[in-house]
Amino acid sequence: MDVPLLLTGAHPDRTTARRLASLGLRRGAHVRLIQRLASGGRIVSVAGGRIAVDAAVLAELPVEVMA
């Protein structure tokens, strides 16, 4: 499931957007979906690290699939 993505914007909630940015999930970041979680969330790889992100947050992140 190693899907490469480009974040094209920020989360609409400012507090959440700031927290995600501190983890490397900011506009222009190259992200890879690594693993699906039973809860619907995902493990994503960004900036050399891995982060668990829940499905509701992921649904609000604007991304483009990279070829």
Image (cartoon, rainbow, N blue to C red):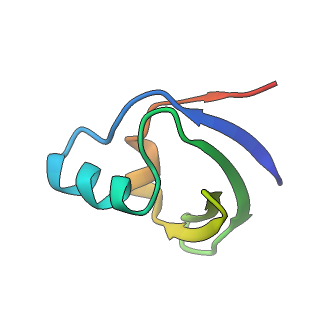
- Judging depth in this view, the residue of 47 and 33 nearest the camera is 47
In the rendered image, residue 2, in percent from the top left (x then y), is placed at 82, 52
Q: Is residue 54 above or below residue 63?
A: below
- Judging depth in this view, the residue of 64 and 29 nearest the camera is 29
Tell me which residue sits at (55%, 69%) in the image: 51
Left or right: 1 in relation to 24: right
Which quarter of the figure is the N terminus placed in? bottom right
Q: Quadrant of residue 59?
A: top left
Q: Is residue 40 above or below residue 66?
A: below
Q: Is residue 2 above or below residue 8?
A: below
Q: Residue furthest left?
A: 14
In the rendered image, residue 22, in percent from the top left (x then y), is placed at 35, 60
Tell me which residue sits at (19%, 46%) in the image: 13
Which quarter of the figure is the C terminus placed in? top right
Q: Quadrant of residue 64?
A: top right
Q: Quadrant of residue 3?
A: top right
Q: Is residue 61 above or below residue 34?
A: above
Tell me which residue sits at (70%, 50%) in the image: 32
- Judging depth in this view, the residue of 39 and 31 nearest the camera is 31
How many discs mark residues in the rendered view?
Answer: 0
Q: Residue furthest bottom?
A: 38
Left or right: 64 in relation to 55: right
